[in-house]
Amino acid sequence: MELIIGRDGATAKLKVVNGTQVSLFGEAASVPGDVSRQHCQLTAIDDNTFVIKNIKAANVTWVNGVEVQTKRITKDDVILLGQSRYVLPLLDILDQIRPNIADITPLKAVWEDFNRNTIAIRKRQQMNNLLSRIPIFLTMLGGCLIAVSESIRPYSIAFTVIALLIMAYGFYRQATDRGIDEQEKLKKQFQRDYVCPKCGRFLGFVDYDLLQQNNNCPSCKARYKK
């Protein structure tokens, strides 16, 4: 959030510009003439920390009684504008214009849980697929043993029995596996949790490390606190 603060030329009220949003504070003619129409800029660092900066060097701004050009401030600091020391109603301004900052750090755990559970389901499904291939290998091996020597036929039968048992187990694993249902449930939960803290918009199936490379929410434009 970046606010441009100054005196409104038409009403001499305090004028605060936040992007395309314009807000007026106080009574008409309440802001003295030594406060410029674009006097200072207020930039949010987080919900309680800001940087105030004079837009022009000739402008006069005071923080806790000390004249400054640029200063890091908090909500508790007293800000005065101009030589007449007009008291800036900082708390009133912040109450009306909330800093548009979104803390996305909790989303790291959401992504890690989703990624870990997704990988676990895929590994289990890969194991099921592997079990379905083992009987084919054992059957082929048994056939090769018979071709080598009839005396090995008992071993071939044993391979066939083992292959049938593994096949049955593989069918059981595949029949009882709920991987598709688990993935769908996991996906829906992720879509509910992996959202912008400000506007609640789903941020997509984007790796958290890649998400951190962005500076703003694509929907509400809240600046990410990382």
Image (cartoon, grey):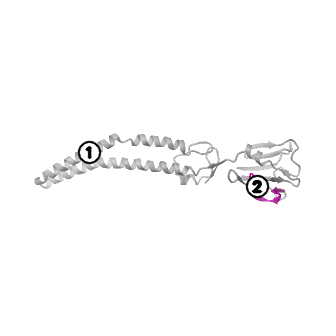
Label 1 packing within 10 angstroms: few (<14), some (14-19), many (20+): some
- Is 61 magenta? The answer is yes
Residue 153 is left or right of residue 183, and the answer is left
Label 2 packing within 10 angstroms: few (<14), some (14-19), many (20+): many
Residue 15, image x, y percentages: 80, 45
Residue 225, image x, y percentages: 63, 52
Which corner quadrant of the image does residue 83 belong to?
A: bottom right
Q: Quadrant of the C terminus?
A: bottom right
Residue 48, image x, y percentages: 70, 52
Which corner quadrant of the image does residue 165 belong to?
A: top left
What element does badge 2 sit on?
A: strand
Query: Which residue is disc 2 drawn over?
Result: 52
**Residue 120 versus residue 12: which sits nearer the camera?**
120
Residue lying at 19% horizontally and 47% vertically, measured from the top left: 160
Residue 114, image x, y percentages: 48, 48
Answer yes or no: is residue 28 visible. yes
**Residue 138 versus residue 94: which sits nearer the camera?**
94
Name the amino acid, label 1.
Answer: Met
What distance separates the C-alpha of mark 1 from that of mark 2?
72 Å
Answer yes or no: is residue 20 visible. no
Residue 185 is left or right of residue 131, and the answer is right
Residue 216 is left or right of residue 156, and the answer is right
In the picture shown, does residue 22 fall above or below 213? above
**Residue 191 versus residue 38: which sits nearer the camera?**
191
Residue lying at 21% horizontally and 51% vertically, measured from the top left: 140
Query: Which residue is disc 1 drawn over?
Result: 167
Name the amino acid, label 2.
Answer: Ile
What are the residue bounds of the magenta stretch? 59-77
